[in-house]
Image: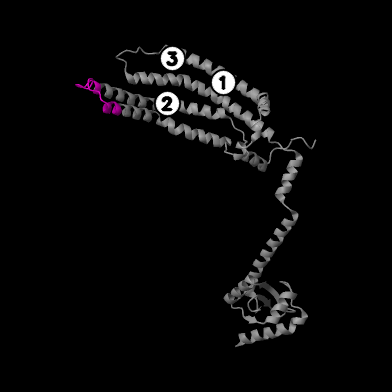
Amino acid sequence: MSGERTEAATPRRLEQLRDEGRAARSPELGSAIGLLAGCVILQTTAGNAATRLQGLLTGTFTDLSASGRAQDIDVLWAQQALGRAGEAWLLSIAPLLLVLPVLGIGIGFAQGTIFSFKAMLHFDNLNPLNGFKRLLSLQSLVGLGRSLAKVTLVGLLTWRALQDTASQLPTIDGSTDPRAMATFLAQAMLNVGLPAAEVLLVLAVADYAYQRWMFQRSARMTKQEVKEEHKQQEGDPMLKGQIRAKQRKMAQARRQMQEVPSATVVVTNPTHIAVALRYDRGMPSPKVVAMGADLLAERIKKLAREAGVPLVENVPLARGLFKSVEVGDEIPIELYQAVAEVLAYVYNLKNK
């Protein structure tokens, strides 16, 4: 049937949907890649962070045990200690703060995430009935299944990782090395985070493939819609004819300008009209090779001067030629006498 949406969406249709804020994207993909990137960053920066933490704690306790310091802790010292702690903490998490936001924005744009006022002003989204329909849709059921699978798999992996990590927990006492403790905590987070990130990434890729398939399916068009779009793109036949006529006129003007240097004489109005004539022995009669009014006439006269073609002012002849002939035509019989006089004048000039 002609009303069935069997045709793939055209580029214009996809652009319209994009303007409305609709595109194939999966929120899970950004979260999974972000978690995986966070684990990698943590693994590469944990050693430096532990060293920085050890230096902070060592310096603080050394300062406290200094002579008289423990009994003379003032506000200034507390502010300085908090400042050092804040600086150490900020430097430790700086890679995460720098990389993760940029990564999230990049993934969003790669999926086609866009900001659209049309989507914000779509009041159908506020209709409770539409919201209830969305809850019972196939996409909602798929989302529920995806969430249950994610929670189940991540929960099992986390429980197993915590069991393996608990057996390696070091004894914490006054002699515990802060660096060793920080390294252990970082490794424990990696043991939990990496498997979870890998599972989430697999689920996110599958979800993105499904979302893309659903989007392409919903964006399909009927045969009539495709025909109407092609008709709109081709435009009004009358307008297309006018454009082609203008293009032909411009091409003709360019060809005329190329013929001006080979003309025998240019007859002028003198200001508004210019007609370039060519006559060689053996030709039946002179021929019009270029003709124009106003700006085009000025262009013809300029090219004629540059090529050394004589300009002859003859108002009646210029007007008669302009009204009665076209470019490429031979002059009419009634203008033979006037043109012959102009050519004789030009030949006399050349002989002198």
Please state the extent of the stretch shown in magenta in the rendering. 63-80
Three-letter residue code for mark 1: Lys
Q: Which residue is mark 2?
A: 42
Q: Which residue is mark 1?
A: 150
Residue drawn at (50%, 21%), measured in percent from left and top?
195
Q: Name which of mark 3 and mark 2 comes first in the sequence.
A: 2
Q: Marks 3 and 2, how far apart in space?
A: 17 Å
Please identify, in this view, whether the residue under mark 1 or under mark 3 is nearer the observer.
1
Q: Is residue 76 magenta?
A: yes
Q: Marks 1 and 2, how far apart in space?
A: 23 Å
Three-letter residue code for mark 2: Leu
Identify the secondary structure beneath mark 3.
helix
Q: Which residue ends up furthest to the left in the rendered image? A: 67
Q: Which residue ends up furthest to the right in the rendered image? A: 1
Q: Name which of mark 1 and mark 2 comes first in the sequence.
A: 2
Residue 260: percent from the left, percent from the top? 64, 73
Of residues 135 and 90, the one drawn nearer to the viewer in this rendering: 135
Image quarter of the C terminus: bottom right
Q: Is residue 54 magenta?
A: no
- Residue 64, compared with residue 280, is above or below; it is above
Q: Which residue is mark 3?
A: 165
Identify the secondary structure beneath mark 1.
helix
Please identify, in this view, whether the residue under mark 1 or under mark 2 is nearer the observer.
1
Residue drawn at (76%, 78%), measured in percent from left and top?
332
Mark 1 vs 2: CB contact within 8 A = no
